[in-house]
Image: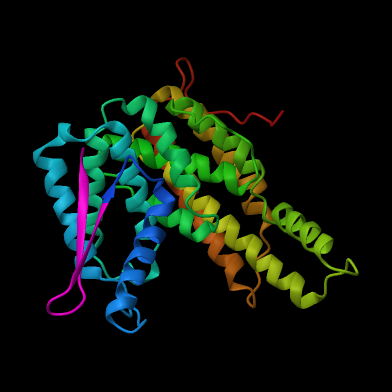
Amino acid sequence: MPFICMSVSLHQHHAVSKCISYTDIPLLQRSSETQMTLGEKGSEDSSSKPIFSTLPESNILNVVKFLGLCTSIHPEGYQDRELMLLTLMLFKMSLEKQLKQIPLVDFQSLLINLMKNLRDWNTKMPELCLGINELSSHPHNLLWLVQLVPNWTSRGRQLRQCLSLAIISKLLDEKHEDVPNASNLQISILHHYLVQMKPSDLLKKMVLKKRAEQPDGTIDDSLHLELEKQAYYLTYILLHLVGEVSCSHSFSSGQRKHFVLLCGALEKHVKCDIREDARLFYRTKVKDLVARIHGKWQEIIQNCRPTQGQLHDFWVPDS
């Protein structure tokens, strides 16, 4: 059974080793149990002092490189369940602030091997999306997890798209247990999500939630301004995720009509809802992102042929 042995030197003649089996203990408990075990043994030898003041970045990086070598040389040595646990652990590690200095090349190289070695990819990929989606609740961290997925492989692009959709659904409080896999279905669902990304509507939800938490049920101007910043920040994250879903691979002419509808929804529900102000630069930043996404979609539309029998795309009112 595959396992990793992590050895940490405490003194010149003392060492503590901990073997972690990926099929015996739950994923989210491993890091805390490992730290507790090392802390208990370290207190006996160093007068209750912590083993290290910071995380051992070099040791972790060596483990990541070694796993990359193992998964590359002997890909059939790991079962799908073990590959899933390794992948989730790697994503969880990437959220650690003290590991920000570690190069992403080694992380992404290992991720490519783990995704490539999954035998039942079509079944495990939705499960992997839902598992990664539960690693954090902060929008910034969730966007980071999406951008960590390599987009230069077919499986990486597929995971990136499905993960983005799952996170969009989570941030908008939608209840979808299934992750859509077909490209046409993904693009059509985006229209439903774009309607809910209007900054003013997101702000109303935040205000109602905050009023319910206040004793007197009132919100002053400073708190309202802070909630508005949060609403625009959430819109900014959501639009980045929309771009990940819609601009990750080439599209066929049959999807042209979906992008025409997306362009209309983006302008009507997001762009027209933003009132720029010289004192509120965050609004301009969101509007600039809207313009970039709209430009990419227009490029996709121009590169796809119109529907057979039509020379131009005609405007169709929303139902």
Write the start and end of the magenta stretch as one range: 1-19
Image x and y of residue 273, in percent: 69, 54
State the residue in front, 200 or 234.
234
Farthest residue, direction right: 216
Q: What's the image's color scheme? A: rainbow
Position of residue 242 relative to residue 288, above or below, is above
From where the camera sits, is residue 109 visible?
no
Q: Main secondary structure of the magenta part?
A: strand
Residue 12 magenta: yes
Image x and y of residue 216, in percent: 91, 69
Q: Is residue 300 left or right of residue 265?
A: left
Farthest residue, direction left: 73
State the residue in front, 295 or 315.
295
Position of residue 311 relative to residue 174, above or below, is above
Image x and y of residue 162, in percent: 44, 37
Q: Is residue 34 left or right of residue 212?
A: left
Among the 4 quarters of the image, the one containing residue 282 = bottom right
State the residue in front, 316 or 51.
51
Image x and y of residue 78, in percent: 21, 35
State the residue in front, 265 or 129.
129
Tally the numbered discs.
0
Residue 228 magenta: no
Position of residue 222 relative to residue 166, above or below, is below
Quarter of the image where the N terminus is located: top left
Among the 4 quarters of the image, the one containing residue 13 = bottom left
Residue at 47% x, 59% y is 141
From where the camera sits, is residue 28 visible?
yes
Residue at 21% x, 51% y is 4
Among the 4 quarters of the image, the one containing residue 127 = top left
Farthest residue, direction top: 309
Residue at 66% x, 72% y is 277
